[in-house]
Image: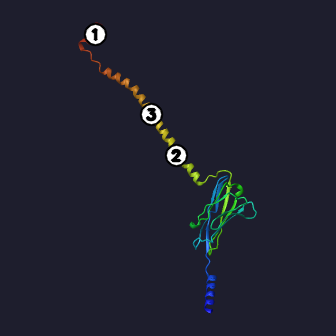
Amino acid sequence: MARAASVRRLLLLLLVLWPVAAIDIFTPKTLDALNGTDVRLKCTFYSHAPPGKRLTVTWNFRPHSGGPDQNVFYYHEQPFPVTMGRFFGRVTWDGNIQKSDASLLLWNVSPADNGTFQCQVKNPPDVDGNIGEIQLVVGLKVVLSEMHILSLAIGSTCVLMILLVVVVVVCRQQRQKRLEKSMEMVEPERDRSQKEKLKPAQPEEEVMARQGERA
């Protein structure tokens, strides 16, 4: 009995002293979206323990306009969307726990969704760690991103190159036409000169006879 009690005390001591590791959560700091579009709230995590049945994911929302935090989504072995509130019917699970992904899809965003979305993951014994936060900014107009600007620059350059090629081709064609026209005008003059050179010379006696008649 004394030995069994010692073993139990040792096991309890090991459980108390068992190191609890922190879980790391990664999310983008900000996310820009256009009114009426759908966005993906990306949240990934790293846990020292493999994802187990006790793993939970909690999403909350803190509006920029102020007010209490609101429930967005809950996951424990399966997705549990909210059954009421502003996010009812607008949030879909888009994660994969086995791939350390706890992302969501948010449909039909509006400026009312401007705020901070918080992603919290717990995977016992990894229960401590940071909370991922995404600042969502929904705009009414399209904001040109660096990729859009680069695409416009490349498109404009291509259009200018095409116009330049067209101008060069047209100029060459006009020059060729002018050259052909000038050649057509020179040919008759050349033919006339050649014909004059090819006329037979008059005999000397005929020339002397004509001069005598004139005298």
Amino acid on which the number 3 mark rests in the picture: Arg
Position of the C terminus, as image quadrant, is top left
Report which residue position mark 1 lands on: 210
Q: Residues within 10 Å of mark 1 (few under 14, many from 20)?
A: few
Tag on residue 105? none
Question: Picture coordinates of residue 69 (x, y %)?
Answer: 73, 64
- Residue at 61%, 54% in the rendered image: 145
Amino acid on which the number 1 mark rests in the picture: Arg
Report which residue position mark 3 lands on: 175
| Image depth: mark 1 or mark 3 in front | 3
Q: Is residue 171 left or right of residue 129?
A: left
* Location of residue 130 with respect to 160 vertically, above or below: below
Question: Picture coordinates of residue 192 (x, y %)?
Answer: 35, 21
Instruction: Evaluate whether residue 212 shows in this view.
Output: yes
**Which one is earlier in the sequence, the residue at label 2 or at label 3?**
2
Q: Secondary structure at mark 2?
A: helix
Amino acid on which the number 2 mark rests in the picture: Cys
Question: Which of the pair 118/195 is nearer the observer?
Answer: 118
Q: Is residue 125 left or right of residue 186?
A: right
Tag on residue 158? 2
Instruction: Evaluate whether residue 215 shows in this view.
Output: no
Quarter of the figure with residue 78? bottom right
Quarter of the figure with residue 61? bottom right
